[in-house]
Amino acid sequence: MSLSNNDTTTTQNGLPDRTKPSPPLSQPSSYHPSTTAIHADDDLNPTIPDIAPPIHISSTFRYSSDPTALIPAKDSSTNPIPTDAHIYSRLTTPTTTRAELLLHPLLHSPAVCYSSGLAGLHALYCFLNPRRIAITGGYHGSHGVVNLHRKLTGATILPLDCPAHDIGEGDVVHLETPINPTGEALNIALHAAKAHARGAILVVDSTFGPPGLQDPFVQGADVVMHSGTKYLGGHSDLLWGVLATNKPGWVEGLRAERTYLGNVMGGLEAWLGVRSLRTLEIRVRRQSDNAVQLVEWLDGELQNDPNGVVSSAVGKVVAQVKHASLQTQDMHWLRPQMPGGFGPVFALMLKTEQMARHFPSNLQLFHHATSLGGVESLVEWRAMSDTTVDTRLLRISVGIEHFEDLRDDLANGFRAVAEEH
Ligand SMILES: *Cc1c(COP(=O)(O)O)cnc(C)c1O
């Protein structure tokens, strides 16, 4: 099956035929995302019978054996990116190109891949070179990148809720939503309006709200960033960054600068990434549904304490549950912003630091580790990796296990910690 009517430009032996033009990337398609994720790259399949894509590891690629087909660099345009005529792997490779081809319809904008989420963010700040960046809390590593940009350029860092007149043309409003580590959501449309009224650019780190849950472009994002390491990858086995943007010329500019930053995604990682995108939609929906059910259960346990008398083990250990699904006062903008679900990460504020330190060791199914987005559920005493966070906070990344098993595991953990303390 083919999503476009382009002939594949391969020779009979399956090798690229550089005498024919490359098929253009990123055919818009009317298929559902779950279909697109399986078929948007069908045009890249060479005339060999493999169903799974080949693994390409070459760092360099043979030029055409036909001297008349050789185009010197000074005469060749850099765009559109070639789907078959690869030159050197710091520019493009077959499998990273395949990943970008799949991401375009999933993210509803052309996308560029990087070696990690933060590598992509750094590339974005190099490209935009803003004089001011408005940002709040969220992933601590993103602040590390913003601080690097400040070191190199002298840029000013402002609070996200700064007065609109503090930002201007070409500045960046950096919005992470849902936000690390609590999984609570911020209003994209509100920040888009503020940024655009001042000629500033809205960058949305949508890592906690992967495709299937939200599309920040609908609410006005100019650039959407993902740490593909998390949900796009989904199996805790690769680093991956993605930038997508609908601004004319920006993807081409990012791709051109990536050649000199050299922060490209490796071919083997791209192969894992492509394999992961096939199942993105069903993974994320199951993870988000599981999280909403767990949050509902935990919140119910806290609400049901009659007259403030702490009866359940949850009530003895947990002070507060934090998650977008609990933002009942925000549903008028939040439901349209996250039509597919409220995200698979939530946080628990325990009653004491000691409880938060001990709780992860009392679980069987949730691994105690940082990161998120994988098929396996994780819990993290967040103080282990974030120096700025409340030491009573646990971050939970919900996997695709069965809800009741996850609930029972947490319940056993709460009972054990309640008895210990
Ligand atoms: C993990 C993460 C990043 C950084 O991504 P890496 O792939 O680890 O570089 C950025 N933002 C958020 C919200 C993240 O969770």
Image: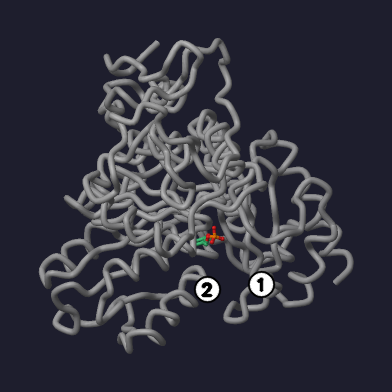
Disc 1 crowd, CA 10 A, few/some/many (<14, 14-19, 20+): few
Amino acid on which disc 2 is placed: His
Give the vertical position of 403 relative to 313 (above or below).
above
Secondary element under disc 1, as helix, strand or loop, is loop
* Alpha carbon separation for disc pair 1 and 2: 9 Å
Secondary element under disc 2, as helix, strand or loop, is helix
Quarter of image, res 339: top left
Name the residue at 33% across, 89% down.
154
| Residue identified by numbered label 1 | 385
Q: Is residue 200 left or right of residue 345?
A: left
Q: Is residue 253 left or right of residue 415?
A: left
Name the residue at 66% across, 72% down.
385
Residue 78, position as x, y percentages in the image: 27, 47
Q: Is residue 340 visible?
A: no
Q: Are marks 1 and 2 in contact (CB under 8 Å)?
A: yes
On-image quarter of the N terminus: top left
Amino acid on which disc 1 is placed: Ser
